[in-house]
Amino acid sequence: MQSFFELLEKNQDILLSTIWRHLQLSVVSLLFALLIALPLGIYLTRNKRIAEPIIGVTAVLQTIPSLALLGFMIPLIGIGPTPAIIALTAYALLPILRNTYTGISGVDPALIEAATSMGMNSRRRLTKVELPLAMPTIMAGIRTAMVLIVGTATLAALIGAGGLGDLILTGIQRADNAYILLGAIPSALLAILLDVLLRFTEKRSMSSSFKPILAVMALLVGLIASPFFIQGGKADIVLGAKLGSEPTILINMYKILIEEQIELTVELKPNLGGTDFLYNAIKKGDIDAYPEYTGTAVVTLMKQRPVSSDAKEVYDQAKKLMADQNLIYLNPMKFNNTYALAVKKDFAKRLNLKKISDLKVHTDKLKAGFTFEFKDREDGYKGIQKQYGLNLPNIQTMDAGLRAKAIGTGDINLIDAYSTDGYMIEYKLVALEDDKNLFPPYQGAPLIRRTTLEEHPELENILNSLAGKISEEEMMEMNYRVDYKDEAVDKVAREFLEKNGLIKRK
């Protein structure tokens, strides 16, 4: 726990901003859910014939995995808070709608009859009898929706919406429990706090009609309008990055290079998920550029086979394919962050493992941990099965950071690795030789929208200043410093640029 408190002290400003961002996503989503579900629930009590089908639709929405729903929205709506709010609103509809319908429908018919006999019309019966009696049930639904939203909002970080999920994702990538707790504990406390506030309102709602609802909505609007939630203007250039320290380091380098040389503002959106998330985001125009790997562009994005194992030929192939998509592939850096199968050095020595082919006679001793993406890629496990005839009986799929920690603890003994990642140093891993040349070259290079480059042509020379630079050893060391030494990403990026004379020392 000591490391957690040290991390908390070190990241107080970041934590405060992520809490407010998380709260913003939550309250905006709840407000929209209230505006939709409450009137709809009242309407359904007057039209019960269509009530069950409509409530059933909201129930189906809630069964859709949140990550799948967020991913589905990227090509339709883009990245950022908007798709996150839409998804969170959809998840919050069911408890509010169902409780509104159930609460009003459950009012004693004798009371309705008595109100009618006193001359009350439908509107007065609703406001004077039904809503006051149903309000505790309705408020319970609102409370349930709020807690549900706060918990689910942590996934919004995967599409660039921010919030406490940023800290949790960082912890998962680095297999660092302190970072995970730094995001998870405030999220849980925030849910408890909001639940207590709404519960207090619920207890005072027995004899009221719209007052509790209006109070809740006023609170939500007040939070949204607070100075904490005022957003700045859109940056001139938006750079995205996949999950992990390496792409985040690279976009920090891009940002520093751009802002040091020209009068453009740059916004960074790191940790936007996997390859498809970023590709959809750049096609949609939500980001202007992101670092992509040549082999990934050819095999994963364009579903083609590399023309050869030569790095330049694969880059030229990727550049042509991306140009057909109105994307410009700038010049690649030196390092080749290729896929590899990796084991601990002592394990390799014990079984005399030097190349991937050597694994075939030891399948009964192998416990593999692969990332979700690798297991389903042609330049991943599918390709290994075809080209090496290697079928592993014991495979676990997991997040990249978790599988690195798992091989360190001995829970698994074979992983899909990226040759420049910091865990190669931390866990003393060795990459097995790809003796049948399955993995194509994976040189990193900026992938940028054609329209962005036409608007700012000076970006080409600026970003190409990294071409042919950053060796595999340098990239691995920078990743290690960020992931395992907890050094600031922008600091590591700036130090490399200063050391190599790409910017002036401050």
Image (cartoon, rainbow, N blue to C red):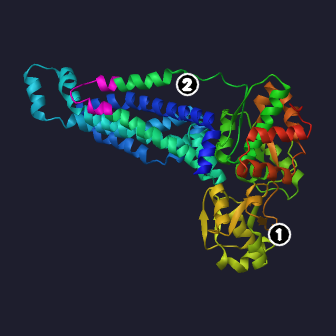
Q: What x and y, as percent, mark residue 354? A: 81, 73
Looking at the image, which residue sits at the far front? Answer: 2
**In this rendering, does residue 361 appear at all?**
yes
Q: What x and y, as percent, mark residue 463? A: 84, 36
Please tell me which residue lies in front, 13 or 19: 13
Q: What x and y, as percent, mark residue 57? A: 38, 42
Residue kind at label 1, given as amino acid type: Asp
Please tell me which residue lies in front, 213 or 506: 506
Q: Secondary structure at mark 2?
A: helix
Q: Which residue is mark 2?
A: 228
Residue ID at (88%, 49%): 334
Residue 209 belongs to the span the image colors magenta: yes
Q: Which residue is mark 1?
A: 435
Quarter holding residue 258: top right
Residue ID at (25%, 25%): 209
Disc 2 to disc 1, C-alpha distance: 56 Å
Q: Which residues are magenta?
A: 200-214
Q: Quadrant of the C terminus?
A: top right
- Is the residue under label 1 in contact with that under label 2 (CB below 8 Å)? no
Residue ID at (81%, 22%): 263
